[in-house]
Image (cartoon, rainbow, N blue to C red):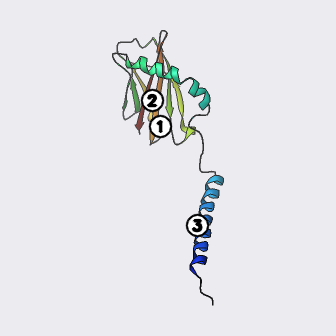
Amino acid sequence: MKKLNWGTGIVIAFVLFISFILYFVIKTSTDTTYEYDLVAKDYYKDELEYQQRIDKLNNAKKLTQNISISKTTEGIAIHYPADISQEKIKGTVYLYRPSNKKLDVRLPITIINQTQLISKDILIGGRWNVQVEWSVAKESYLFQHSLNM
């Protein structure tokens, strides 16, 4: 049997390494359990509206009391400012799950005693980004918060 020299060993090592990399590229690109979605479906449209989001965030910072979020045994409690009448507050709550867009939830704001409760039945464990886009009269606000359930 002929001995392998160092040049042949290097070539064999490169071929094995390239084969290993190609195997994982092909496996991850053809496997349906891996999701390769963009963060937002219409990210170009979202980018054009970015200044409006900044304005809404700045409006929220000017409030004497902003929205706050707390975890409870029932789920998530969103507390709205006490100095604003709950009947005047309109908007939506968007619960964004970074790991799986199928779990995203968009709810209308429904306030009872300055608080909106989001049931833990629709929230599984893990990270959630909460966005509350709300308005009073003609002034719009945006509140963002991340939490782990």
Please state, as top left, top right, bottom left or bottom right, where the N terminus lies in the image.
Answer: bottom right
Secondary structure beneath dot 1 equals loop
Disc 3: which residue: 17
Residue 59: percent from the left, percent from the top? 42, 17
Tag 3's secondary structure? helix
| Vertical position of residue 59 compared to residue 75: above or below | above
Name the side, left or right, on which 65 lies relative to 111: left
User: Who's the residue at 51% across and 39% down the image?
Assistant: 98
- Compare residues 100 and 63 and report the one nearer the observer: 63
Residue 85 image offset from top left, x and y in percent: 40, 11
Question: Which residue has dot 1 on it?
Answer: 123
Residue type (three-letter) at the residue carrying disc 1: Leu
Q: Earlier in the sequence, mark 2 or mark 3?
A: 3
Quadrant (top left, top right, bottom left, bottom right) of the C terminus = top left
Q: Give me the residue at 38% from left, 20% from top.
A: 61
Residue designated by label 2: 118
Identify which amino acid the numbered label 3 is placed on.
Answer: Phe
Q: Are marks 2 and 3 in contact (CB under 8 Å)?
A: no
Asked if residue 45 is positioned above or below residue 64 in the image, the reply reads below
